[in-house]
Image (cartoon, grey):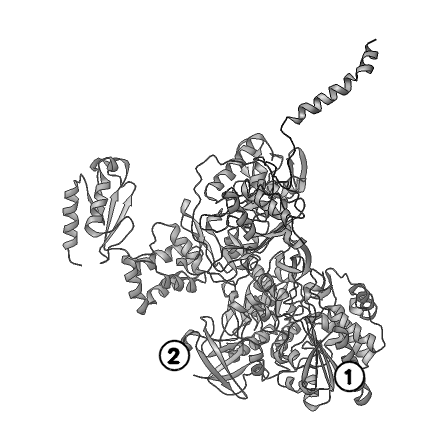
Amino acid sequence: MKNVFETIFFTEILQGLGITLSHMFKKPVTYRYPFEATPIQDRFRGIQYIKTHADGRTKCVGCYLCQKVCPSECIHIETDCGPNGERLIRKYELDLSRCIYCGYCEEVCPVDAIHMGWEWNTVASDRSGYVINMKTLSMNYKDNLEGNWKNKHLKKKLVEGVQQ
Amino acid sequence: MVTVKIDGKEVQVAPNTLILDAAKEAGVTIPTLCHDSRLNPFGACRVCLVEQVNNPKLQAACTTPVTDKMEIITRSEKLSRVRKTAIELLLINHPLDCPVCDKGGECTLQDLTYEVGVTKVRFDAKPNDTPVDHTNPFIERDIDRCVLCGRCVRICDEVVNIQAISFLNRGTDTIIGTSFEQPWNCEYCGQCISVCPVGSLNNRIYLFKNRPWNLERVKSVCGLCSCGCTVDIDYEGNEVFRMKESPAEGINHGYMCAKGRFGFEFINSIKRQSEAVVKAGGESKKVSFNEAVEVAVEKLRKVKDTAGADAIAVVVSPRLTNEEAFLAGKLAKDVLGTSNLFSTESEEVYPEATLEEVENSDCVTVLNIDVTESNPILGLAVRHAARMGSAPLAVFYPGYTALKRVAKKFVTGNPDEVRASMESYAAAVAGASNEYSEWAAKLTKAERPVVVFDPYNKADVKIAQDIKKACAKVKVVPAKSKNNSVGIVDMGFGAKCATEFAKGLESGKFKAVVVLGENLSARSVWTKSASKAAGLELLLVTDPFMSETAAMSNVYIPVATFAEKSGSFTNLEGRVQSIEKAVDKGVNTDACVVSAIAKGLGAQLPADANAVRGMIEKEVPLYSGINWDGGVVSYPYVFAGEVAATDGKAKGKGRFFLYPASLRLHSGSFTRWSPDLAKVYGEPMLEIGVEDAKELGIKSKDRVKVKGEGFEGEFLVEIEKKVSKGCIALPEDFVATAGIFCNGKSLRADIVK
Amino acid sequence: MATEVKETESAGKEIDFTACDEICEKYKDWKGATIPVLQQVQDAYGYLFSEIVERIADNLNMSAHQIYGVITFYAQFYTQPRGKYIIRVCRGTACHVQGSGRISEIVNEEFGIRNGETSADLKFTLEEVSCIGACGMAPVIMINNKTYGNLKPEDARKIFREYAQLQG
């Protein structure tokens, strides 16, 4: 008897239409990427940055621990002895196309230099752009300090990129 | 034998064995920090403390000998607490700068800290902050990191016997340092670096260049002097980062010298050539390896057809491996059909005593050679015999050497006086009664006497032979100079006298000369005629560097150094040892060059070391069935025949006696390409005594002219306390000095300001 | 500071090594003679400076660094010149309580020297010692072999001035 009633008056379809109708007045949960950026959580692991001292010198001492711990072998370091017998970082390269953003480098760093940042956009037109060096990593730190990454920098850059 | 029980395992050991060694026998490891089995027990660190059953006191395993029925416990709750505290106490003053410390990754203190589980130091950390000492050109000294285990001081005292560093002050102020905080000057052997358990003493050549876990390691044999030390070559990719001792291995027991430890950088030198050069019509052109070989083959064929095979000569350097020298001989004899095989070496003298025999000798005599500089590891063996075995050591040398401190008798004077003394010593051994009779008696009465001499000095060879003849049990050590000086002779390059080649060049007999690795201009026997080689139909030179001879050549082919090839060297004992290829610098080996030339001439010669070894075993009787990894060749004789008595008197006229100085770090021929050795000793220096310098009014670093009969040259002055009055000395193998010593080994000269 | 002046003076001068050589000759073949040699050489030359240590090392066939290690180990050897009068100020418990610190300060005020230093005119050396066994007379000082006890700061100053006015 009930079945007949439901069959005649399409109650299930109306129920379904009701849900659809109610969603029409709710805020959408999706983001209009690339015109809109997703919010980034505090513990998000994005492109690394390396902290600098107040005078601009890098905090990194070139101990090779991040290179050793990196599971995808994306970090390459070359060090040498400086003119005054100090430890000198000749080359610090991080290949973002290899990086799996595991964050081990951040964890192993004994001098609190390398950190995982919030930037995640690595779009580049060729592969060489994925290899970033100490200069870029230090710049990233500055960007991070200024909050660029978490807020405007990200949005602005993204939209610019798409418009191009 | 006594029975001891270690952690429940019973072992039988000799009485007076240390607990540590007994534990090793039982298969139990006891952690140590200050202990080194090559040094006397010290017991400074208290890390090796063990419990003895029924003894309330803990014992240091590295200093306590075992007694019968002793029961030892090496792991217990109490012990781990004690060890942990010992490490924690060390960490009070030790800065925790492992990330920047070069020792990180191979540091004993680091390992122990992990092992005993120190995560936090309970005491107030008071790391020192003294500036790092860079006064030593090869060794960085950071006394803050020092844990005062005393290994460096002890090895410098007990093994090297230079005592360049010592414990200073007392108690908590103790540091390792030099007298009156003088700059640290020593032999630069770097033994102290090799034993430092922390990063207090570091190798400045390797400093901060890499990390131990990145490096791959290959065990090889050092290719510099003729001692034949077993070394570890640490490399990453195609770059050699350091040469390091193989701990307690090889004939060198893990000791090395400045040359081996710090002189390897020539392998990575930017001055290394990578392309072959062919000169035609005054124009030099860079060509490929195959093209260069083609040119050489064509010219060889032309000379052979027009002037005959006798117009071709092959010269090899003692830097080649046995396999390469054998191939070069094959090429000359079988393919080219010439018997003109030359090298600076001769088969007049063959090795006899091994380094072990020198160490265990009970009477050592050193004739007119500074072994501590020319063959440092042989020098260590002599010192070991004189100090540990307390063998009476007699040294004859114009001027004091580092052996002075251990020698019971040191005869100095001008070269003529020294020669006369050596002659009367030899006569005394033969039975004559003179002032040396007492010393000769020591030699004749000894059971295992050893005589070290310079095989390149005819007059010295004569004296050594006289001694050997008078006293048959004497074992002689001809201190050959280069890594394969002995091996190339075995491969047939010692039969002809080196002067014959010079004569051939002068007379124009040779039209084509193949020079494998040799630098004619830097060899005193050839330097005068070297310029004649420039005008030859073919001068083929293979060398890793553009040497003076290579610059004269019309075909130059760059080749590999000892770290880039496999093969074997025969050291001064006659011991054949294998070398391993570590890196590839993109150049061919001498073996490839020889094999390619042979192929061009229509013959087949293998370039592979193993294949060549099979041929050597078949064709060289001395090497048949030899163990290529440490086998000693048994030579038929020591001295080829009666050495003609030569007048060893100094030639010429002049106020000063001029003799070849002991090498300072390097001889100037090959190792001068090492930037680090060259930094310390870049050009030949004229050594002069303090008194003479004062009389002439010469100061250190002045430039003076040395003039003698038939030679002249200007050199930097180095004032040396050890040089005798009336003597001056110059190193021998530099291009600038080879022209002087071609006149003789002992000369007279004047100094003109 | 005072010693630097002395060193530059001695650098220009020729040093007479005969006394040193004689002492070394006497002990040449002895084993364990380093300390008596150093003691006697120090008696002859006043203190052990680098040239004399080098000379001893050459004569005894030893390393100067090893000898320097011995010298710095023992308190009885000095590598700096010493004053004619050695002021030993007791800094033991009893003297400390009685204010011996003030006496050290007075030495500094008078001669400008601190513990272990020597005045520029090579007259006074100040040494602070742990106890000289005269606690009953605290605070106590010794000048060479003469002992002065129960000192008040101004007494001490008077004594020092007396010594300073002595010929020398």
Residue where numbered disc 1 is placed: B299
> Residue B251's image quarter?
bottom right
* Crowd around label 2: few <14 · some 14–19 · many ≥20 (10 Å): few
Residue where numbered disc 2 is placed: B697
Of residues C71 and A58, which is closer to you in this image?
A: A58
The residue type indicated by label 1 comes to Lys
> Residue B544's image quarter?
bottom right
Same subunit under labels 1 and 2? yes
User: Residue B197: x and y, percent?
Assistant: 55, 48
Distance between mark 1 and mark 2 Cα atoms: 56 Å
What residue appears at the point 60 percent right and 64 percent down from the top-left corner?
A: B265
Residue B438 at least partly seen: no
The residue type indicated by label 2 comes to Gly
The N terminus of chain B - image quarter? top right
Using the image, name the chain to which the residue with label 1 belongs: B
User: Residue B110: x and y, percent?
Assistant: 56, 43
The C terminus of chain B - image quarter? bottom left
Q: Is residue A103 above or below residue B427?
A: above
User: Residue A52: x and y, percent?
Assistant: 49, 48
Of residues B706 and B372, which is closer to you in this image?
A: B706
Residue A117 at least partly seen: yes
Q: Earlier in the sequence, mark 1 or mark 2?
A: 1
Of residues A98 and B704, which is closer to you in this image?
A: A98
Q: Residue furthest bottom?
A: B507
